[in-house]
Image (cartoon, rainbow, N blue to C red):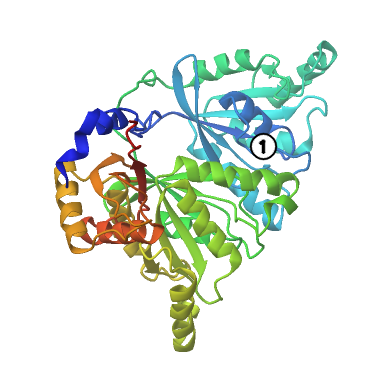
Amino acid sequence: MSAEYDENGWIEAELATLDEGGHDEEPDSGPLPVVAVVGRPNVGKSTLVNRIIGRREAVVEDVPGVTRDRVTYDANWRGRRFTLVDTGGWDHEATGMALKIAEQAQIAAELADVILFVVDATVGVTDADEAVGSVLRKAGKPVVLAANKVDNHLVELEANELWSLGLGQPYSVSALHGRSSGDLLDVVLDALPETPMMKFGEERGPRRVALLGKPNVGKSSLLNRVAGEERVLVDPMAGTTRDPVDELIELGGQPWRFIDTAGIRRRDRELKGADFYAAMRTRAALERAEVAIVLIDASDVLTEQDLRIISLVIESGRAMVVAFNKWDLVDEDRRYYLEKEIERQLVRTPWALRVNISAKTGRHVEKLVPALERAIDSWTTRVPTARLNQFLTELVQATPPPVRSGKQPKILFATQAATEPPKFVLFTSGFLEETYRRFIERRLREEFGFEGSPINVTMKIREKRKK
């Protein structure tokens, strides 16, 4: 590269303005005590969860059965950290899908350290409340009884009826308006086992993986397969998952945090109610992840939805593994046409790692971990500046940039400004054509890897010196 790269200190000044990237989020710090929020359908569990975590994460709608899986959230109160588990409605007379939801709620209660039992104080004790209360009394775990929807003193008097459940004092709260929610959390903290106070700057926790795909492509089935048990609901009906579901799973001798998400539909603007908020939370889950597994139905043609989901991952800057699911249904003819579709429609993402799997039979699911590890390694790779400039010097000598307006632009210097994803900045004397920048990107991948990770190549053009 030319020695004029430091002329007038231009590059040094530009380097000082580059965004170094990185993350300021608090890492995971080992097992935390678990609080499970349970109760019959539509008593305000998810609203209370949103109140406790301080943001609108859990999907809320004024109809029963919106929450379906066990959904975990990180929460803290007065410096104490704990895991909060939102559950679907627990109804002992449920059948079909409602029965599966109730089973997930019961599992959450069995695994929790403290159970937060939510009852609608405006309705009073129902047969379903008494049935759940009977189970909780035998559980042998601390139970905090929350009398929800207590918006005034009159309802507070009615809440005293909940003593009949035999679970101790009912604590009046309004999840919607926040009334007495702090007092309720104080009681929950007193029931929690001892846990370290919040710490910052600890070692990075489990790698975070988001499962994305259109509805009914097999995301929940894959999560259950890698977990080795039924962690989330699976049903032939599309749209079973609505909230992002976090699950800690040990694979390849290390923990991973998998985030199962709601299926992304064709047009979000047409969605309403719970489906709309589910789509919003899927995007938020992707932002929390480091790598995304995009599931595609290999037995069907690539659709606009599949391509849009891949574009969403690229725009987010996350590493990516494309898993072609339902491979057990693919015959020789379909494999031929699938390869043609990939060549034609995924021409801009040849760097995405590909794995052919069957979540139903378990075929080649074990290949996901090496692919995820390679993608994250690429996503976090930093190329030394000296090595990068040596590579570019040799590249430019062999293939100079195309002439523009009678002049040939020079690459004066280059640096990697960030990782996660890798971002490269080229300091140039003139504009580089997009085709040449894509050529540089392709050669960077060939030289340094970057399998499974997007990379960003930008320019800083030196201004002409004033006379």
Q: Position of residue 231 (x, y in %)?
A: 50, 51
Above or below, 172 relative to 291: above
Quadrant where the image shows the C terminus: top left
Quarter of image, res 172: top right
Q: Position of residue 179 (x, y in %)?
A: 71, 15
Q: Nearer the viewer, residue 350 or 361?
A: 350
Tell me where residue 418 sits by quadrant: top left
User: In the structure shown, which secondary structural element does the residue marked by tag 1 occupy?
Assistant: helix
Taking the image as shown, residue 344 lies to the left or right of residue 6, namely right
**Is residue 403 or residue 140 the one in the foreground?**
403
Give residue 404's position: percent from left, percent from top.
36, 57
The answer to whether residue 420 of the structure is visible from this angle is no
Residue 323: percent from left, percent from top: 43, 65
Nearer-the-camera pick, 311 or 50? 311
111 left or right of 374 in image: right
Kind of residue sitting beneath label 1: Val
Q: Nearer the viewer, residue 125 or 187?
A: 187
Q: Residue furthest bottom?
A: 333
Residue at image coords 47%, 21%: 192
Q: Residue furthest right?
A: 154
Q: Is residue 96 left or right of residue 232?
A: right
Q: Quadrant of residue 43?
A: top right
Question: Dot 1 corresponds to which residue?
Answer: 132
Is disc 1 surrounded by few (<14), some (14 to 19) or many (20+) residues within 10 Å? many
- In the picture shown, does residue 68 fall above or below 171? below
Residue at figure coordinates x 34%, y 55% from the top left: 372
For image coordinates 63% across by 25% down, the residue present is: 51
Q: How many marks?
A: 1
Q: Is residue 247 visible?
A: yes
